[in-house]
Image (spheres, grey):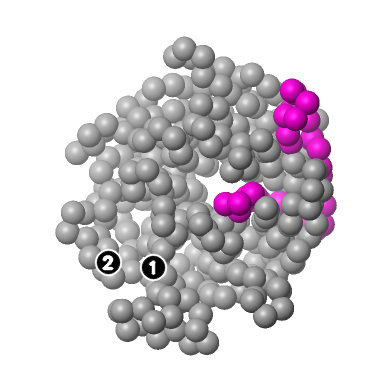
Amino acid sequence: MGRLILEHTLQGHKGRIWGVAWHPKGNVFASCGEDKAIRVWSLSGNTWSTKTILSDGHKRTIREIRWSPCGQFLASASFDATTAIWSKSSGEFECNATLEGHENEVKSVSWSRSGGLLATCSRDKSVWIWEVAGDDEFECAAVLNPHTQDVKRVVWHPTKDILASASYDNTIKMFAESQLDSDWDCTATLSSHTSTVWSIDFDAEGDRLVSCSDDTTLKIWRAYHPGNDAGIATPDKQTVWKCVCTLSGQHSRAIYDVSWCKLTGLIATGCGDDGVRIFKETSDSKRDEPTFEQLTAEESAHDQDVNSVEWNPAVAGQLITCSDDGTIKIWKVSD
């Protein structure tokens, strides 16, 4: 069995902390929360400390933050219905653009792998796709409304311009740009959860997706492309996503976040029962019927709900978490 070793406990925000996000280089992270502020933290020696506080971009709670793949930009999604784009081009972080259009709370923001596209989603049930049109300029490329309820999360595929979204309507949707008319279309609906899908994440290749839900389960989905050797039918030559594994019994409350490590293949969850759990694919796992086991769990990782978990993209086995308890914790998985 592996172990989850606590390396650092960090405080600074007032109130609950909603989101944490590693910089692509893994030596800096950002955090956001109820106090309407973004904190940028960096490591010097063995100590993490706040280097910058960005407090003038939003009027309400900041729900999520994401670094661009190049690491030059930071996007923040807020309950004030806007998404702010920050950059350090002048040496200090500045809010260089504010994206408006959603009717109410923006719940999530995500950069495409190329950095040329940005996605946002909201309680207004819509998913927006923005094109980076130049320095500090963003143009709305699509407003997508296939969800029937609040959209909780948007995540881009790790290598392709394919977007996944998760919603209060219990489903996950996939979007891609049509080759014919350059319109964005919903290409798949993933239905199996019986309650809100809080979060989703792709594996390193992007052929599998993990989802977590209010129904206390984790689900693993696999993409079957046209002409697949498993014999799965693909109507209209569209990729079909099938639920190939359900993990239940490990969580006692809603699972609020999930992160699939691109370096190790480990899956981490953050839960409403204050716990953080790590799952590993078994050695005898089959492609079309994969099996996962719980590697380790920290049942009382935080004193309240765990809102966000994210693996360090550059340091294998390092995990960051944040909570309603106002703390950020950095962990290391050991074998």
Residue position for label 1:
222
Residue ranking furthest to the left? 284
User: Contact (CB < 8 A) between labels 1 and 2?
Assistant: yes
Residue 288 vs residue 106, the one in the foreground: 288
Apparent side of residue 100 relative to residue 276 in the rendered image (left or right): right
**Which residue is pictured at 71% across the width and 51% down the height?**
106
**Which residue is pictured at 81% across the width and 38% down the height?**
96
Residue 270 vs residue 286, the one in the foreground: 286
Where residue 64 appears, as percent x and y from the top left, is 63, 43
Q: Amino acid under label 1?
A: Arg
Q: Amino acid under label 2?
A: Arg
Residue position for label 2:
287
Q: Residues within 10 Å of mark 1 (few under 14, many from 20)?
A: many
| Residue 60 among magenta residues | no
Secondary structure category for the residue under label 1: strand
- In this picture, is 289 found above or below 120? below
Residue ranking furthest to the top? 45
Segment tinted magenta in the rendering = 86-115
- In this picture, is 303 found above or below 106? above
Where residue 309 appears, as percent x and y from the top left, is 47, 41
Pick the quarter of the image with the C terminus: top left
Apparent side of residue 260 relative to residue 150 in the rendered image (left or right): left
**Which residue is pictured at 64% across the width and 75% down the height?**
178
